[in-house]
Image (cartoon, helix red, strand yellow):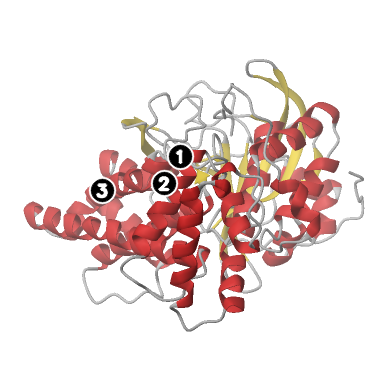
Amino acid sequence: MPINETPLNAGWNFDNSYVRLPDSLYTRLNPTPVPFPQLVVINQPLADTLGLNTKALESAAGIAILAGNKLPEGASPLAQAYAGHQFGHFNLLGDGRALLLGEHISPSGKRFDIQLKGSGPTPYSRSGDGRAALGPMLREYVISEAMHALGIATTRSLAVVTTGESIIRETELPGAILSRVAASHLRVGTFQYVSQWGTVEELETLAHYAWHRHFAEAESHENRYLSLLREVIKRQAALIAQWQLVGFVHGVMNTDNMTISGETIDYGPCAFMDAYDPATVFSSIDTRGRYAYGNQPQIAAWNLARFAETLLPLLHTNESQAIEMAEEAISDFAEMYVHNWLKGMRAKLGIFNEEQQDESLIDNLLSGMRKYGADYTNTFRALTLGKYEDLIWFETAEFKQWHEQWQARLARQQQSTAASQQLMQNSNPAIIARNHQVEAALEAAVQDGDFTLMRKLMDALSNPYAYTPEQNEYATLPESTETPYRTFCGT
């Protein structure tokens, strides 16, 4: 990408609140410079939202900032400390290869974390090199922006730059740095860290900070910290339901990868499910299926219970009463999740109101899809379009019987057929970031330096509910193979 040498004001507007928290929560540190940074992709729509000048970001000075070679005015870089249950085992963690540059205030007054991922080693690197490879950084860029376009709360990607140096993993790979944008990087693991190694006063300071940063507009007629717990539960119940509704498998739902803000974070071994199967696992290290697609709601509840445990000293001075308050709040998650999921599934089927039989209608559909290995996204795409072809499931007697029941259900509501079809189109993406298409785009970019496929894919994914003829090629399924698709923790 050509570099604009004209010095321009990028529009950075930092106001850093995290650095005013107790010193134990972070380590001040500058990024490690890289030799020859080059910009390979920049997110124009996100830059506009942030109030940043894209031409300035594309300049030599702008690229130096995106690579960590230069600090923007007002930045206060730091590596955050946190802990986490990784596959159920508690560990001391932290930003091992990422630095928070600071908090940028957009023209609308919203506060965003600006983080460089792959910016060098930190005290939390645990013998790692602190760097990242180009492929995984591009993968996070593609998937996080695809999730945003689907309307799912997520961290986003502003840019990816190559570093001009190689890093060693299984092989020698080109290095890269991703600029990640988030409502914040506060995690369940952040609270676990303070709960385990900090003081009650530090825990209260962190909880107070989290409330004002993310829930200041929420009503609080009770214990402020109980309200914090309830709000986090509410957001996670909505988020996980959205994941399930589009067939997204996160792959590594450790507690350090659950945000307080309710945003999806960390796109390492994630992928979208093709054939519907609750046991779907993509991560190469999830050998026991802990984070399988069908387990995600239960894992979210488990993670939230760990969050609630950190808040016990703040919920009540009497431990037994604090536990009772926490358990009551956590018990609401299942009902919230099911409510969100059922509402979403009704919308995917064009249903506006509620009937008791809806759950069995949905269950019967999913059972048939699982039995015949029907593609999750394309099944709902076909139902939306009314074109039943290419899938064996549609040729079965079970489907025809289910279809009659579904049509009878739609006929019992007041809304028109056209209204139901519009609701379905708004709720069922015509395309998702298909694993084989993402891999093809990344291979061309990393191995050949050809970003044509990636740009074309990103353009299609930017409006997944459009149902345009140009999107048809992205609805094609991968060729069948005996080798299951596997993802790796590269980000």
Tag of residue 371: 1
Q: Quadrant of the N terminus?
A: top right
Q: Is residue 116 or residue 349 the one in the foreground?
A: 349
> Among all residues in the image, which is located at the extreme bottom?
414
Helix, strand or loop status at disc 1: helix
Name the one closer to the observer, 197 or 74: 197
Q: Are marks 3 and 1 in contact (CB under 8 Å)?
A: no
Which residue corresponds to mark 2? 367
Label 3, secondary structure: give it.
helix
Mark 1 Cα-neighbour bin, 10 Å: few <14, some 14–19, many ≥20? few
For the point 41% across and 57% down, which residue is it?
362
Q: Locate residue 213 relative to residue 114 in the image: left or right.
A: left
Q: Is residue 76 visible?
A: no
Asked if residue 43 lies left or right of residue 337, the reply is: right
Q: How many marks?
A: 3
Q: Which residue is mark 3?
A: 305
Spot occupied by residue 143 in the image (x, y as percentages of width and height)? 63, 46
Residue 59, given in percent of the width and then of the height, sits at 86, 50
At label 2, the amino acid type is Ser
Query: Mark 2 Cα within 10 Å, few/some/many (few <14, many 20+)?
Result: some
Mark 2 vs 1: CB contact within 8 A? yes
Residue placed most toward the observer, 329 or 249: 249
State the CA–CA distance, disc 2 to disc 1: 6 Å
Which label lies toward us, 3 or 2?
2
- Mark 3 to mark 1 CA distance (whole Å): 34 Å
| Residue pictured at 59% horizontal, 21% vertical | 482
Residue at mark 3 to residue at mark 2: CA–CA distance: 30 Å
Which amino acid, by three-letter code, is at mark 1?
Answer: Lys
Viewport quadrant of the C terminus: top right
Residue 195 horizontal/vertical position (percent): 27, 44
Mark 3: give few (<14), some (14-19) or many (20+) Cα within 10 Å.
some
Q: Tell me the kind of residue under disc 3.
A: Ala
